[in-house]
Image (cartoon, rainbow, N blue to C red):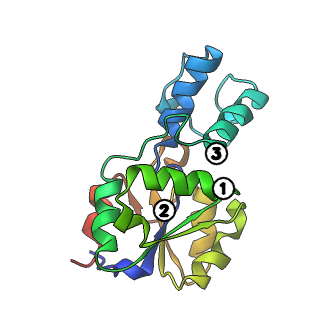
Amino acid sequence: MINIKNNEIGFDLDGVIADTGEAFIRLACEEFDYCSFRLQDITSFQVENCLAIPTDLVDQIFYAILKDSLGTGLKPNPGAVKVITDMTDKAPVTIITARPLEQPVADWLDHFFPARTCQQINLVAMGDHDDKVRYIKEHNLKYFVDDRVETCLQLAETEITPIVYNQPWNHDRHKLQNVSNWQEIHELLES
């Protein structure tokens, strides 16, 4: 059992803190009438590689979520708000997202998290899945939770310990430490 200090762990946003899979599936159905798939059908991080939905629509849906997370109804994963709020009572929490736009994320956090929690969140919108190592090191993090296997494998080659947040698109694609929910993340933290 690991005993991670709150200031040593950081988090990805989409697929870890935010339930982006649910939002994508709902918007694909509501906006474009692609209603025949479930979260379990998204077996690749590149959604267009595993679903019969045109790439331009995939891009359109993800862009809508990226640009207006609140307006598209993006919700937090169960337990994320409580665990992060509890963590910020002890130390600031760092969120590093590959999203290029910080404001929609900040607005989303402000909506779902208490104001005192948001004041203790270091948010980095860096715009590139393959450049997270640099930002994680800049924030002196030793652990990072991400749902993208490629990112976690990159981290594993450094002194950063990746923790894979289980999603259908990363299932059976790694041998790294993983978690399935925020309760399991909470159990890794120093009490």
Per the image, label 2 sits on a secondary structure element best described as loop
Mark earlier in primary sequence (2, 3): 3
Mark whose residue sits in front, 2 or 3: 3
Residue kind at label 3, given as amino acid type? Leu
Residue kind at label 1, given as amino acid type? Arg
Q: Residues within 10 Å of mark 2 (few under 14, many from 20)?
A: few
Q: Quadrant of the N terminus?
A: bottom left
Distance of label 1 from label 3 (alpha carbons): 7 Å
Contact (CB < 8 A) between labels 1 and 3? yes
Which label was assigned to residue 66? Answer: 3
| Residue 72, position as x, y percentages in the image | 55, 34
| Quarter-of-image position of residue 81 | bottom left
Q: Would you place residue 97 above or below residue 159 in this image?
A: above
Q: Quadrant of the C terminus?
A: bottom left
Distance of label 1 from label 2 (alpha carbons): 26 Å
Mark earlier in primary sequence (1, 3): 3
Q: Would you place residue 24 above or below residue 154 in this image?
A: above
Residue sitting at x 53%, y 86%: 140
Distance of label 2 from label 3 (alpha carbons): 30 Å
The residue lying toward the viewer, choosing from 40 and 83, is 83
Residue 162 in the figure: left or right of residue 125: left
Residue kind at label 2, given as amino acid type? Lys
Q: Residues within 10 Å of mark 1 (few under 14, many from 20)?
A: many
Which residue bears the numbered disc 2? 175
Which residue bears the numbered disc 1? 99
Residue sitting at x 39%, y 47%: 77
| Residue 115, position as x, y percentages in the image | 38, 62
Visible in this render: residue 141? yes
Q: Residues within 10 Å of mark 3 (few under 14, many from 20)?
A: many
Mark earlier in primary sequence (1, 2): 1
Residue sitting at x 49%, y 47%: 171
Per the image, label 3 sits on a secondary structure element best described as helix
